[in-house]
């Protein structure tokens, strides 16, 4: 009888032209936004900006209140997400110039290479900022190693950030739209070519700088670094969000009938903030609010594509940010003047670049209809854990020498109790801080001179989430225990058992 039922089902599938699919492995989409703080979206308390799509994602999924990027800046947090290793362990993983060499070694196990072993098609779209090629990279030839050499099957990327040259897209191994008759030159030392600069030609700027950003002018905006050539390949800032989401949706459409993993790293809301005209002046808190709403539109486009392709119940969709928020980050765009009561980091102290909670505690939403029950989770988790967690979801073993700091938090991601999250976490922003239970320990480690134990900081986040009251002197035993635990983990080279 059972065999007959199976035969009937199989014939029905054949009759409709459908084929069985490996539903045990969910599609995985990571939308990693840029510089979006805990308080920057509606479901985390924002009122001056409207984020209906992100809010809808949270309503149908799990919203985490104690989720973190590993670092308070972009390059190190992205390195950690893709390698499962805290970036402070990796020399040279600070914020990179636009002509840096690739900092992830080809051949090491990464999140995309691991999922490829499990049968996934892997794609990377958006901001990269992990370096490309080797020394003396020629932007007019094949650009490798890059995303394809560390496990992605397809890539369409911005090499670094929107405020750094070269201002071009790279698809797989080539600059998009490159013209051999107009070769691209890039320098982060001396000027190249005769392009106007923000420093010498401020009258050509449509967006003034508040600090730095006064080298080569592209699209009326001064950048960090010098560039000449590649006129036909240069992006238009107002179109970046649309270009990236179109490439992301195209990847989803092409691979809808097989397990896929898409890493969509948006440019929004990083500087320069130059929204498309349909989002300009759309918020109640200036241009920074406008690009938050543009980001929300991109999230909505991905959600719409999943619905149209009937992939919602087959897809684990994550939304998060690479680090905490920043308001004035080098351009005089009025973001600070027009906050209008908006609080980017929500209830937390600090922001991008900061060791305090606002530097790494970020929005984190997981949606998988039919598998993740809607709700709110207080479980402690970190983006460094995605590697081990996705390995468990995909049914592939994480090698012993891979992802040294990545923990399998599948239970927490799927809605388990608070205890199913991490029991400790290292936060990174220049120096290190250590979380365990309600306690957060911030050792005094000045840039020059020996550490001063009298200036250590200890906070009880359960009672003081805003880190306003240093209780180190009242709890010397906690300071000692947490200091020793941090030092053990720092020296050990791994935190995964």
Image (cartoon, rainbow, N blue to C red):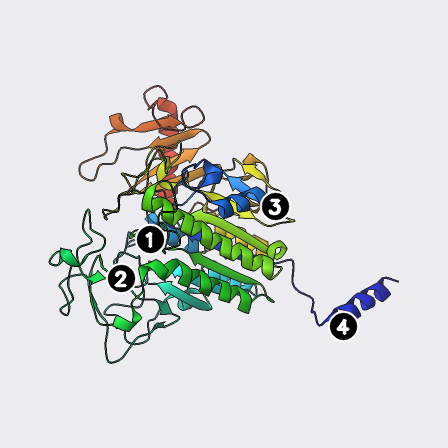
Which of 326 and 448 lies nearest the eye of the viewer?
Answer: 326
Q: Which residue, given by chain and number where applicable, does mark 4 sit on?
A: 15
Residue ID at (64%, 57%): 24
Residue 38 horizontal/vertical position (percent): 41, 39
Q: Which residue, given by chain and number where applicable, does mark 2 sit on?
A: 100
The earlier-in-sequence mark between 1 and 3 is: 1
In the rendered image, the vertical position of residue 318 relative to residue 119, given as above or below: above
Q: Quadrant of residue 490?
A: top left
Q: Which residue, given by chain and number where applicable, does mark 3 sit on?
A: 372
In the rendered image, the vertical position of residue 398 relative to residue 342, given as above or below: below
The earlier-in-sequence mark between 3 and 2 is: 2
Q: Which residue, given by chain and number where applicable, does mark 1 sit on?
A: 75
Determine the secondary structure under disc 3: loop
Q: CA distance from mark 3 to mark 2?
A: 40 Å
Which of 317 and 86 lies nearest the eye of the viewer?
Answer: 317
The earlier-in-sequence mark between 3 and 4 is: 4
Determine the secondary structure under disc 2: loop
Residue 147 horizontal/vertical position (percent): 40, 65
């Amino acid at each position: 009888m059972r065999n007959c039922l199976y035969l009937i089902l199989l014939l029905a599938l054949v009759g409709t032209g459908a084929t069985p699919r490996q539903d045990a492995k969910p599609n995985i989409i990571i939308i990693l936004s840029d510089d979006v703080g805990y308080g920057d979206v509606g479901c985390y308390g924002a009122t001056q900006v409207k984020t209906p799509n992100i809010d809808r994602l949270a309503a149908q999924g799990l919203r985490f209140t104690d989720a973190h990027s590993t670092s308070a800046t972009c390059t190190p947090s992205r390195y950690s997400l893709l390698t499962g290793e805290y970036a402070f362990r990796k020399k040279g993983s600070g914020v990179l110039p636009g002509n840096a060499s690739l900092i992830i070694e080809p051949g090491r196990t990464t999140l995309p290479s691991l999922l490829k072993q499990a049968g996934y098609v892997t794609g990377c779209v958006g901001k990269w900022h992990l370096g490309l090629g080797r020394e003396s990279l020629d932007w007019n030839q094949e650009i490798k190693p890059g995303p394809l050499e560390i496990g992605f099957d397809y890539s369409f990327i911005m090499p670094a950030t929107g405020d750094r040259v070269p201002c071009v897209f790279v698809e797989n191994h080539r600059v998009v739209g490159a013209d051999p008759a107009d070769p691209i030159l890039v320098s982060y030392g001396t000027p190249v070519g005769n392009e106007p600069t923000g420093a010498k030609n401020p009258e050509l700027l449509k967006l003034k700088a508040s600090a730095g950003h006064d080298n080569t002018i592209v699209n009326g905006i001064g950048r960090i670094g010098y560039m000449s050539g590649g006129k036909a390949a240069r992006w238009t800032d107002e179109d970046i969000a649309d270009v990236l989401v179109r490439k992301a949706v195209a990847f989803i459409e092409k691979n809808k009938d097989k397990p896929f993993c898409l890493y969509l790293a948006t440019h929004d809301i990083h500087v320069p903030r130059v929204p498309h005209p349909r989002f300009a002046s759309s918020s109640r808190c200036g241009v920074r609010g406008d690009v938050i709403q543009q980001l929300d539109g991109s999230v909505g486009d991905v959600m719409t594509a999943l619905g149209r392709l009937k992939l919602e119940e087959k897809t684990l969709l994550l939304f998060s940010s690479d680090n905490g928020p920043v308001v004035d980050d080098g351009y005089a765009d009025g973001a600070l003047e027009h906050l209008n009561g908006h609080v980017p980091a929500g209830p937390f102290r600090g922001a991008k670049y900061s060791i305090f909670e606002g530097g790494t505690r970020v929005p984190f939403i997981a949606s998988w209809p039919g598998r993740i029950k809607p709700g709110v989770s207080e479980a402690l988790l970190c983006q460094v854990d995605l590697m081990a967690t996705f390995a468990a979801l995909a049914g592939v073993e994480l090698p012993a020498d891979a992802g040294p700091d990545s923990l399998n938090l599948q239970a927490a991601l799927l809605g388990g109790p608070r205890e199913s999250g991490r029991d400790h976490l290292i936060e990174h922003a220049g120096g290190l801080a250590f979380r365990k239970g309600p306690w957060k320990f911030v050792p005094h480690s000045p840039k020059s001179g020996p550490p001063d134990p009298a200036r250590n900081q200890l906070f009880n986040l359960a009672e003081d989430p805003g880190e306003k009251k240093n209780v180190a002197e009242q709890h010397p035993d906690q300071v000692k225990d947490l200091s020793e635990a941090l030092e053990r983990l720092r020296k050990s080279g791994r935190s995964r058992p």
